Image (cartoon, rainbow, N blue to C red):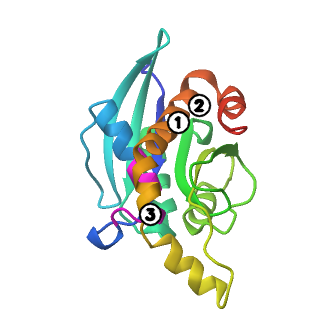
Amino acid sequence: MAAEFWLIVGLGNKGVRYEGTRHNMGFMVANELAARWQVKFSNFKGLAELGQGTMNLQGQTHKFLLAKPLTYMNNSGQAVESIAKYYHVKPDHIIVIHDDMDLEFGRIKLKSGGSAGGHNGIKSIDACLHTPDYARVRMGTGHSSRAGDAHSNSIDFVLGKFNAAQRKELPDFLADGADAAETIMFNGLQKAQDKYNAR
């Protein structure tokens, strides 16, 4: 029997306008993993950029799929559901990497299940998979000011770019996000949480 795939999904929005924005943190971590494991992306049914690779670490080997949905954030679940069905990937072998305004920039939290926390990409995936029980790598962006219209500010904030100090720290932060996804695959979610959630 063929080895089971892991599906790692980095969330973001396609297009030059969104490159380097906070909401594209998942895309950035996916790009880090692609460079690290020499993954080439190709188009999957117009729904995602998708690549395949094999990770060899700690005496273990895992085959994985690496995806960046092309559906825009609010419909990310369509891409995740289609890839998972096509490759027979169960939710317990799915890892979704996304931005999180509830965490300070540089913080990473790992979880499975629970609330979408207002993140439309996660809401879409929950709906399409009919379960929230998949691993998530939450990459902290910090939060916008609560002054005035908080909803509008939040949208402007997540679609904005990192400040100069954050841009300097970003490569290390993205590498940490990639490490966290790998740790879930090789050591399980609990051990990965023990390592990253207390930082």
Tell me residue 102's x, y (percent): 68, 61
Q: Main secondary structure of the magenta part?
A: helix
Q: Secondary structure at mark 3?
A: loop
What number of labels is visible? 3
Q: Return the residue at label 2.
A: 184
Residue found at x 38% / y 53%: 68
Q: Nearer the viewer, mark 3 or mark 2?
A: 3
Q: Secondary structure at mark 2?
A: helix
| Dot 1 amino acid type | Ala
* Residue 80 sits above or below residue 37 on the image: below
Specify whether 89 is left or right of 49: right
Range of magenta residues: 19-29
Label 3: few (<14), some (14–19) or many (≥20) C-alpha neighbours in 10 Å: some
**Residue 12 falls in image quadrant:** bottom left
Q: Return the residue at label 1.
A: 181
* Residue 43 sits above or below residue 5 on the image: below
